[in-house]
Amino acid sequence: MQVLKFYLPAMRHLLFASCLLASFAAQAQLKVDDPWVRATVAPQKATGAFMQLTSAKPVKVVAASSPVAAMVEIHEMKMDDGVMKMRAVDALPLPAGQAVALKPGSYHVMLMGLKSPIKAGDTVPLTLTVEGEDKQRTAVEIKALAR
């Protein structure tokens, strides 16, 4: 019985550590370069976040969130019959080893219902939810600089 009392807590710690390592490994699979958010002016209630994403494995971004906004979506801008249109997308595919740019006039993270203005120099926390081919989801935490 004494061995069991020692063994169970040790196994729980080992399982917890394994889960943490798996989470870090999943985040390491997604490289985020130059994350930034467009600064706003006082009455403005929406802005965009931009970055470059490169995944080691084929995944897709299926959701985004931030404590600074009531709603966060992945958007795409593209020309349609000579008119630039913006729409939310259900998922943003990230092919293995290929950089995908989230930039003005293209794919981007849209932050809507801002709780306060975002000033140049602010750091904006973002969370991207990434789903692999195995349907496992991982949260990737990002700190984007406002400019």
Image (spheres, rainbow, N blue to C red):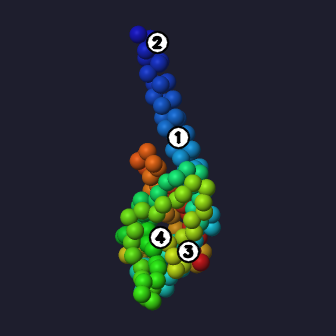
Secondary structure at badge 4 equals strand
Image depth: mark 2 or mark 3 in front: 3
Say whether marks 4 and 3 touch (CB < 8 Å): no
Name the mark on residue 103. 3
Residue 137 x %, y %: 43, 49
User: Which amino acid type corresponds to the residue marked 2 in the rendered image?
Assistant: Val
* Label 1, residues with CA under 10 Å away: few <14, some 14-19, many ≥20: few
Instruction: Give the total number of marks visible in the rendering.
Output: 4
User: Which amino acid type corresponds to the residue marked 1 in the rendered image?
Assistant: Ala
Side (left or right) of 138 relative to 145: left
Residue 140 x %, y %: 51, 55
Residue at image point 47% right, 57% down: 60
Say whether marks 4 and 1 touch (CB < 8 Å): no
Identify the residue under disc 4.
Answer: 109
Say which label, 4 or 2, has the lower sequence index.
2
Image depth: mark 1 or mark 2 in front: 1
- Of residues 54 and 22, the one drawn nearer to the viewer in this rendering: 54
Name the mark on residue 120. none
Identify the residue under disc 1.
Answer: 22
Q: CA distance from mark 1 to mark 2?
A: 28 Å
As drawn, 95 above or below 107:
above
Say which label, 2 or 3, has the lower sequence index.
2
Say which label, 3 or 1, has the lower sequence index.
1
Say which label, 4 or 1, has the lower sequence index.
1
Q: CA distance from mark 3 to mark 1?
A: 30 Å
Identify the residue under disc 2.
Answer: 3
Image depth: mark 3 or mark 1 in front: 3
